[in-house]
């Protein structure tokens, strides 16, 4: 049918509207079978979408050809259909492995996928780059899952964004007028909340990564976190001692003055061989697919991705991540190792455990590689490592100095004269706007450039250009949010919860407080 505006409309008659859960690639979907729906109308290019149960009044808005879903392991090309209440995707090409670019193996009988996401659960949209080009979007839903879409170009991406925000029903979607990361950052109140200690360091770093284009759906643009400690040999840590912390005002490559002197000499030797814009201090990057998979190799899907990156095998055992202290030493001494960390270092103890008993080999010193060797202060416990490491991230020293690191990664020290003055210059192909792949006519040069962009690291979008990031307020500046003496704070324990409210040990120490509406929730150990 056609409505009064000439838009194509599909109505599902004599059926009830069915809620379809947003799922990831590879999930099964509630659809009509061809036998139930009848023969497809070959004259209707969008007949595939009618297999889903459409809501009453739902109608077509616009379709987009050659859209790619970008996920951690693969990319999948197809047709995107936008309606007033849903987003539909029809796969037209085989999914490709992100590293090998070869079709992902699937059962011969498994059909290509038709997928649906309900806009009633859409909460956020952020602009994304793909291969340094602003041609992507990431849609976030109420279940916290993200959908990374790569369009044919910025024009198509902006058209989809405009149609979705003006023609569709997305009641949970926060008002969005721009996809520019810098503009989005300026309009948020996150920095003010962080400065007033209303959100944690971890939360703020995650939001900065999100706004700067970092995503868990693209291993080439994975979220980046800082090394915060420099002591991985002591039996115990005093988190009040500033000597155990890394200098957050310098990039990793500048922490060792002797190594920095070597890098500066090499940098100066580039004069006359490359242009001033193409000179770099560090040949490697602080975040790249190799770095991410180096850290997370013990857990899937990163294990399979690591093997694909290493041409079908595990890397040499001596180069595997097997010792936290050894990894830090490498980052302090090697001229080709300046990597930072990933969020999992503060959240995921499983990353240190060879849960699946993968054959990771043995070093040249005949040391077998399995679980990661932890610092003595972790007491051989991955959970204890994460607990202490997270406390270190939220410590007063890090709180008072984190803005310096933010300036290096997301701020005014990322590029230009300030970057050079702070020894923070990476290969020019890691920066946004450094190259336009569409203007490279030579195929060999183009492929080499694409390979470098994909494999050797991409710098996040710059959120602050001119001004330094403000420091966090001191604890005494704003006063305590609640009384410091929490001994008398009563904690609710449901009667059926393990431990029970009758257990004298049920009320352990309070580890965090959360305000929600008129209530304060206390989480205790």
Image (cartoon, rainbow, N blue to C red):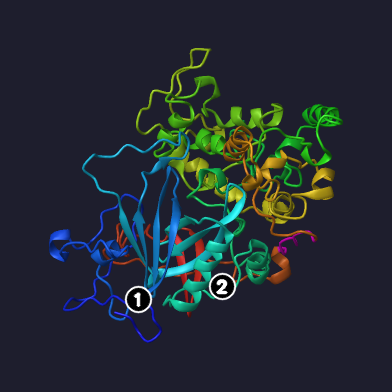
Q: Secondary structure at mark 2?
A: loop
Q: Is residue 368 left or right of residue 290?
A: left
Q: Check disc 1: other Cα within 10 Å, few if <14, some if 14-19, many if 20+.
A: some
Boundaries of the magenta span: 467-474
The disc placed on residue 176 is: 2
- Against 69, is 322 above or below? above
- Against 322, is 438 above or below? below
Query: Residue at (68%, 71%) from the top-left corner?
Result: 479
Front-most of residues 429 and 319: 429
Quarter in which the N terminus is drawn? bottom left
Query: Residue at (77%, 38%) from the top-left corner?
Result: 278
Q: Does the image show residue 525? A: no
Q: Check disc 2: other Cα within 10 Å, few if <14, some if 14-19, many if 20+.
A: few
Q: Quadrant of residue 280?
A: top right
Verify whether residue 168 appears in magenta: no
Magenta segment main secondary structure: loop
Verify whether residue 472 appears in magenta: yes
Front-most of residues 178 and 82: 82
Q: Secondary structure at mark 1?
A: loop
Please provide percent x and percent y for residue 333: 71, 27
Distance of label 2 from label 1 (alpha carbons): 27 Å
Which residue is tagged 1? 8
Query: Residue at (45%, 24%) from the top-left corner?
Result: 314
Question: Which residue sits furthest top?
Answer: 365
Callouts 2 and 1 close, C-beta under 8 Å: no
Please provide percent x and percent y for residue 493: 35, 66
Please provide percent x and percent y for residue 491: 42, 67
Earlier-in-chain disc, 2 versus 1: 1
Q: Does the image show residue 417? A: yes
Front-most of residues 229 and 403: 403
């Amino acid at each position: 049918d056609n409505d009064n505006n000439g838009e194509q409309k599909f109505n599902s008659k004599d059926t009830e509207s069915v809620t379809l859960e947003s799922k990831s690639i590879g999930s099964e979907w509630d659809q009509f079978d061809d036998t139930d729906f009848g023969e497809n109308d070959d004259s209707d290019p969008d007949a595939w979408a009618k297999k889903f149960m459409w809501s009453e009044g739902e109608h077509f808005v616009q379709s987009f050809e050659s859209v790619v879903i970008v996920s951690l392991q693969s990319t999948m090309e197809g047709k995107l259909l936008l309606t007033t209440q849903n987003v539909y995707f029809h796969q037209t090409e085989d999914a490709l492995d992100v590293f090998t670019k070869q079709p992902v193996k699937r059962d011969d009988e498994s059909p290509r996928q038709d997928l649906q996401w309900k806009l009633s659960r859409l909460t956020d949209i952020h602009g994304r780059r793909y291969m340094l080009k602003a041609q992507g979007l990431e849609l976030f839903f109420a279940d916290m899952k993200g959908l990374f879409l790569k369009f044919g170009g910025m024009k198509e991406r902006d058209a989809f964004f405009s149609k979705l925000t003006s023609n569709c029903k997305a009641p949970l979607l926060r008002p969005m007028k721009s996809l520019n990361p810098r503009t989005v950052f300026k309009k948020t109140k996150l920095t003010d909340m962080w400065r007033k200690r209303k959100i944690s360091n971890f939360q703020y770093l995650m939001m900065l990564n999100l706004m700067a284009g970092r995503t868990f759906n693209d291993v080439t643009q994975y979220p980046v976190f800082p090394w915060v400690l420099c002591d991985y040999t002591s039996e115990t840590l005093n988190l009040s001692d500033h000597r155990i912390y890394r200098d957050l005002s310098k990039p990793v490559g500048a922490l060792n003055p002797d190594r920095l002197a070597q890098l500066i000499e090499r940098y100066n030797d580039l004069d006359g061989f490359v242009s001033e814009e193409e000179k770099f201090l560090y040949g490697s990057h602080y975040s790249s697919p190799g770095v991410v998979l180096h850290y997370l190799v013990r857990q899937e899907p990163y294990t399979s991705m690591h093997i694909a990156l290493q041409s079908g095998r595990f890397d040499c055992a001596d180069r595997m991540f097997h010792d936290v202290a050894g990894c830090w030493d490498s980052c302090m001494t090697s001229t080709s190792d300046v990597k930072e960390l990933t969020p999992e270092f503060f959240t995921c103890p499983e990353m240190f455990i060879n849960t699946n008993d993968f054959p990771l080999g043995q070093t040249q010193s005949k040391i077998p590689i399995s679980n990661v060797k932890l610092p003595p202060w972790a007491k051989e416990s991955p959970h204890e490592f994460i607990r202490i490491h997270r406390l270190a991230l939220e410590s007063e020293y890090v709180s008072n100095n984190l803005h310096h690191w933010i300036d290096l990664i997301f701020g005014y020290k990322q590029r230009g004269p300030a970057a050079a003055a702070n020894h923070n210059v990476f290969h020019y192909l890691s920066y946004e706007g450094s190259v336009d792949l569409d203007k490279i006519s030579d195929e060999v040069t183009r492929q080499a450039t694409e390979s470098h962009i994909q494999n050797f690291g991409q710098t996040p979008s710059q959120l602050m250009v001119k001004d330094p990031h403000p420091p966090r307020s001191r604890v005494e500046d704003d006063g305590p949010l609640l009384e410091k003496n929490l001994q008398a704070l009563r904690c609710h324990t449901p009667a059926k919860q393990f431990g029970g409210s009758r257990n004298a040990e049920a009320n352990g120490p309070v580890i965090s407080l959360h305000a929600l509406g008129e209530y304060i929730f206390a989480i205790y150990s």
